[in-house]
Each structure stands twice: as structure tokens, then as C-alpha cells.
Amino acid sequence: MTMQTTELVGLRMATVDVREALTTDWSRHQTDVDLVRVDRPEPDTWPDLAAAGFVVKPDRVTWLAETGTDERDFLSRISRKEREGVAKARRAVAAAELTWRRTPLDEAGWHAFLGLYTDAVSRLRNGLPVAGAHWDTINAKLDRFFLLGAYRGGELRGAAIGEFCPEVGVTRLRFSAVAGEQRNASLSRIIYLEAVRAAREAGYARVTLGNDPNLYGHLVMPGLFAFKARLGFVPVPSTLVDPADGWDVADLLLSMKPLTDPAFMLGYPATGKGPDLDFHFFSRTDDSDTRLFTTCLPAPTHAHRIA
């Protein structure tokens, strides 16, 4: 396989096979490549790739939680400080005179959501409005989807698109967005909790907050990781929720230029593939503060300094 290079929102990625990954002097490519990737490496190659500095990992993670018997049960699993934050957010939503409606998704509802979503993504550092490309897939199985919306009068101010997935026993929150002035009111917190309620009422014991690309500090900011973890969700390999959703990769990070500092990935432990994942933090310094993430999700950590 000859090295193939692509660029995604400033991240220059080289895709190679295992032989090329292990025999190339990647220090000579730091000016033209930010990340080297091996797609779907065979498990027997994982130790050699790890020894060469690659992180073997799921290409994306799914945020998973048990819905619990009721909201009180669900909230009992998170910290007291976070429960206080939820109560404060609910008061803010009530003060803003927002009302909730959950309806089957239709094309009009999709376009209303998309307007909100596109505006929200435009405010992000490296926002990529991926939802718009999913309509044909969603429309082909529309009866599985619902729109969960927070309205002021008839105007949508926050919303999520959810999907009931009986074949894997989960309700998936596919996309969500809030209007700009609602960000400080923590409407996102309440949208997520209302999604948990929708899953519970539909008879599902598990709910997800969808997938994240497994490189925090690029398309997804590290703060979102901490936000989801504090709400009681746990990142697991997406294939453990749905075997057809994603695959494994091995990544070698060469440059911090397109990323936040710190950035991080979640990699498989040395014991092999399973639900538990290790932190791999990347920074230009040796004293990067990672407590925001390790406090809300204790896990083994590995620090990597990138010049």
C-alpha cells in the first residue's frame, strides 16, 4: 500500500499499511503530516504498532448509559455538584418559558432542526456540519426517529434527533443543538436528560448520546468529553453497542498544530479489546493539566509529549 494523504479541517492524515507504519521514519514527516493511521490492523500486529508509538483504538466512541427506573435513579449516579447543576438548568429552562414536545420526525421537523444545528456548528472552532448529509439515510427508516424540541411559543430553541434501535436495544441521540442564547442556560443538559426520559418511556434500558470521533481536540473539543462524562455517560467502542458501527485503527500523532493542547485519544489497554479504554494525552509540555477529564472518568493515563 502506498501512503495516502487527506486533510480534514486542518488535520493532515496519512493512511498506511502495517508494514509501512513500522518501517518508515515518521520523524522526517512532521512538517507535512499531523497523524499517521493504519485502518483495521489485525490484532496480532497491535503489540508491534504500540511499541512503535501508535495508539490502537476504536475510530469512534459511543457515549452509553443505563436509563434507570426513573430520573431520580439516573441522577443518583452522578456527583452532587452535577445534580445541583441539573436543578439550576431546569430552573433556567422554566424561567425562559420553554416547553417540551416530542414528535415523530418528518421533513419539516428535520429542516427546522437543521437550521438550529447549522448555526450552532458555525460557532465551533472546527465545526463540521455532518448532519445535513444524513437525511436520505434517516428518511429511509423515518418511523424509527423522533424530534425532541424545546420551544418558546412556536419557535424551536433547542432540539435533538433521536432514533429507537430495537435490534441493538438502545435509543440513540443522533444530533442535538441549542440556540446561541441558550448555551449559558445549560439547555443541552436538559435536552440530554429528556432524551433519557424518552428512551425510558419507550421501554429501553440503554441510551446513547451518539458517537464522537476518537480524537478530542480536533472536531470535538475536550470540554464536551467532560460534559458528557459528568452527566453519567461512559465512552465505549462504538462496535460494542452496534457491531456494524465503526472499526479499529492505530494512530500515531506527529503534530499538535491543528489540535488543542492537550488533546487526547482513548486507546485499548495492553490486555486487548474490551469496553474499558485508557487515556492517551498529547501536549507540547510535560505538565499539561488533565484533571478535568481524569476526575470525571478515572482510567489509566499515558502522557505523550509532541514537539
Image: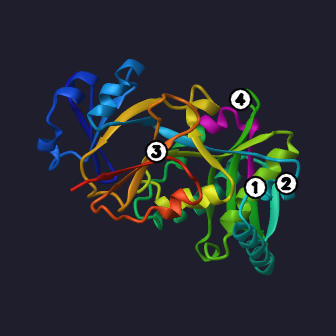
- Residue mark closest to the camera, 3 vs 1: 1
Whole-Å distance between the Cαs marked 3 and 4?
22 Å
What label does residue 77 carry, if any? Answer: 1
- Residue mark closest to the camera, 4 vs 1: 1
N-terminal of the pair, mark 4 or mark 1, is 1
40 vs 153, nearest the viewer:
40
Residue located at (40% from left, 32% from top): 249
Image x and y of residue 290, in percent = 45, 61
Whole-Å distance between the Cαs marked 3 and 2?
29 Å
Quarter of the C terminus within the rendering: bottom left
N-terminal of the pair, mark 4 or mark 2, is 2
Residue located at (25% from left, 52% from top): 255
The answer to whether the residues at label 3 and label 1 have Cβ atoms under 8 Å apart is: no
Q: Which residues are magenta?
A: 137-147
Query: Quick check: is 80 in the magenta stretch?
Result: no
The answer to whether the residues at label 4 and label 1 have Cβ atoms under 8 Å apart is: no
